[in-house]
Amino acid sequence: MECKKERNQEWCNCTYPCSLKGICCECVAYHRRRGELPACFFPPEAEKTYDRSFAYFVKLYQQGEL
């Protein structure tokens, strides 16, 4: 499968300077190894905290912010 890096970057909301931006399969794998979720799982304001934890994701979900 061909990576559509440029197309993925159009909607990627990650504000962290990272070489994986737009390479979704590698980004997901990276965060999974760290026990995290990638930025695209979070709304913009939550993403800016750089808290990628499952606990933060669940908290936002329970508060109706997702």
Image (cartoon, grey):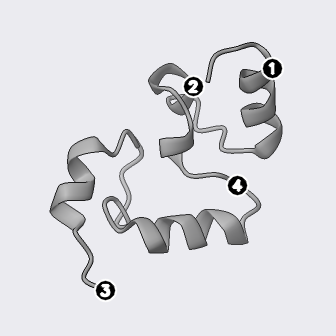
Q: Which residue is mark 2?
A: 46
Query: Which of pointers 1 and 4 indicates the residue nearer the eye?
Result: 1
Q: Amino acid at mark 3?
A: Met
Q: Which residue is mark 3?
A: 1
Q: Is residue 40 left or right of residue 57?
A: left
Q: Is residue 11 left or right of residue 6?
A: right
Q: Are marks 1 and 2 in contact (CB under 8 Å)?
A: no
Placement of 48 over or under 28, stated as above or below: above
Q: Amino acid at mark 1?
A: Gln
Crowd band around label 2 with a 10 angstrom C-alpha radius: few (<14), some (14–19), many (20+): some
Of labels 1 and 4, earlier in sequence is 4
Of labels 4 and 3, earlier in sequence is 3
Q: Secondary structure at mark 4?
A: loop
Q: Are marks 2 and 4 in contact (CB under 8 Å)?
A: no
Placement of 9 over or under 44, stated as above or below: below
Query: Which of pointers 1 and 2 indicates the residue nearer the eye?
Result: 1
Q: Secondary structure at mark 2?
A: helix
Q: Which residue is mark 4?
A: 36
Q: Which residue is mark 1?
A: 62
On the image, the x and y values in percent for residue 61 come to 73, 25
Crowd band around label 3 with a 10 angstrom C-alpha radius: few (<14), some (14–19), many (20+): few
Of labels 3 and 1, earlier in sequence is 3
Q: Amino acid at mark 4?
A: Glu
Query: Which of pointers 4 and 3 indicates the residue nearer the eye?
Result: 3
Q: Amino acid at mark 2?
A: Ala
Query: Which of pointers 3 and 2 indicates the residue nearer the eye?
Result: 3
Crowd band around label 4 with a 10 angstrom C-alpha radius: few (<14), some (14–19), many (20+): some
Placement of 18 over or under 46, stated as above or below: below
